[in-house]
Image (cartoon, rainbow, N blue to C red):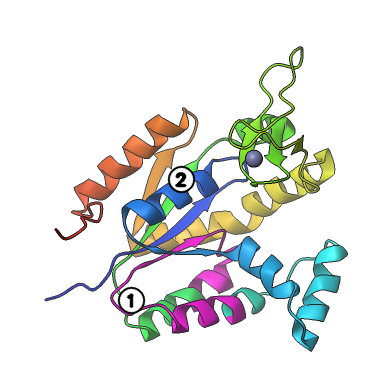
Amino acid sequence: MEKGPFNLIMLGRSGSGKGTQAQILAQEFNLEYIGTGDLLRKFSEQKNAAARRMKETMAQGKLTPSWMPFFIWMQKLAYTDAHKGVLFDGSPRMLGEAITLDEVLDWFDRKNVEVLLIDISRDTAHQRLLKRRVCGVCKHGAYVENEQTPLTHCQYCGGNLTIRAEDNPDGIDARLDWFDAEVTKVIEHYRAKGNLIVVSGETDPETVHREILEELAKKNILPHQEKE
Ligand SMILES: [Zn+2]
């Protein structure tokens, strides 16, 4: 029986390197990348009542309503070729969302779903987030490893590196608390379902990536080959 395209849901604490791995995997496995944060930001720039409301919510630092990601995801899924897999980066954030996402994917006949957790300790996440910078121009991330010779410019485009607005100590704690309280339930949900893959994110990005490929290969999921 044809299993249909491979679909991937990525989970991990802030600072796990999830976004970087997601971008690489989307390319390698020819998956439609669905980055919830970016899509929400783009949507909030549109000219309509929902977008204006969304912009207010985000500016006030409030949590977006739980149905909002689905509103965004559905628009993306509706226009994605049924033969192409999708990759979700940055969700689900709570058990209810995971259960609804399962239903959505099922309805789109996307049965071949794996969930990848890039696992780092709360302590590692905290340390990394305090050192995290982002390029104001190309949005590439960077880490300030050495306080004596601080990194100030992007290694990709030379743009100025800045601290993300949400990476202040309170913002960091709030996100890590949320992960412990809510995302842990999402992880247990997929563990019970049997489609959870866990890879340690404590090492360098190349090692993490290699381990992800090894775990996927064990499930017979191999990178996309361009047809000659
Ligand atoms: Zn840059």
**Quadrant position of the C terminus in the picture:** bottom left
Can residue 65 be seen in the rendering of this structure? no
**Image coordinates for residue 86, horizontal then vertical, percent:** 40, 67
Determine which residue is flagged by label 2: 21
- Is 44 on the left or on the right of 208, as rendered? right
Is 119 or 221 nearer to us in this picture?
A: 221
Q: Secondary structure at mark 2?
A: helix
Can residue 70 be seen in the rendering of this structure? yes
Quadrant position of residue 69:
bottom right
**Image coordinates for residue 162, horizontal then vertical, percent:** 77, 38
- Is 83 on the left or on the right of 227, as rendered? right
Q: Residue at x 63, y 49 (%)?
A: 180
What crowding class fits label 1: few (fewer than 14 Cα within 10 Å), some (14-19), or many (20 or more)? Answer: many
Q: Amino acid at mark 1?
A: Arg
The CA distance from mark 2 to mark 1 is 22 Å
- Answer whether residue 94 is magenta in the image: yes
Q: Secondary structure at mark 1?
A: loop
**Image coordinates for residue 120, horizontal then vertical, percent:** 53, 37
**Bounds of the magenta segment:** 71-100
